Image (cartoon, rainbow, N blue to C red):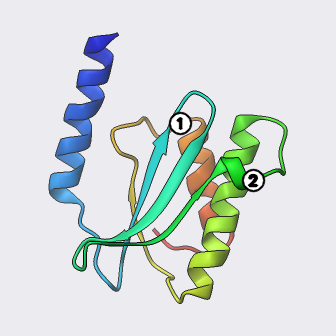
Amino acid sequence: MKDKILKRELRRKKIRAIIKGTSQKPRLVVSRSAKQIYAQIIDDSKQITILGMSTKKISAGKTKTEKSFNLGKELAKKALAKKIKKIVFDKAGYKYHGRVKALAEGARANGLKF
């Protein structure tokens, strides 16, 4: 199990070295646990978190994947209200699969451009 965690951390560090969020294109970071998924929109140039949400506050959806999709939709609505239209997607070393993919598709469905 330690190898799996270490490999994800190495992938995360490689991604972070390349991806930077700016005021025009902030970074959407995804992190997940066994039960929840969390998403933050971060401006790296100012070092501030613009918006943060989790599935704890999302009641729509039966499965974790459906909740992730709805989280992406809600996040996109709030981002568009703050006049954020383009973002850089940071999957933090996770595979683009399952809940991470559902969150990204939900954000795209409501108008965020990656």
Whether residue 31 sits left or right of residue 82 in the image: it is left
The front one of 65 and 113 is: 65
Q: Position of residue 23 (x, y in %)?
A: 32, 84
Q: Which residue is mark 2?
A: 58
Disc 1/disc 2 C-alpha distance (Å): 20 Å
Above or below 33: residue 13: below
Residue 103 pos. (x, y %): 60, 52
The quadrant of the image that shows the C terminus is bottom left
Pinpoint residue 27: horizontal percent, then vertical percent: 37, 66
Q: Which mark is residue 59?
A: none
Residue at the spot x=52%, y=33% of the render?
Answer: 33
- Lateral position of residue 10 relative to residue 31, left or right: left
Q: Quadrant of residue 19?
A: bottom left
Q: Amino acid at mark 1?
A: His
- x, y percentage for residue 94? 40, 36
- Residue where numbered disc 1 is placed: 97
Q: State which mark lies toward you, 1 or 2.
A: 2
Give the secondary structure at mark 2: loop
In the figure, residue 5 lies in which quadrant? top left
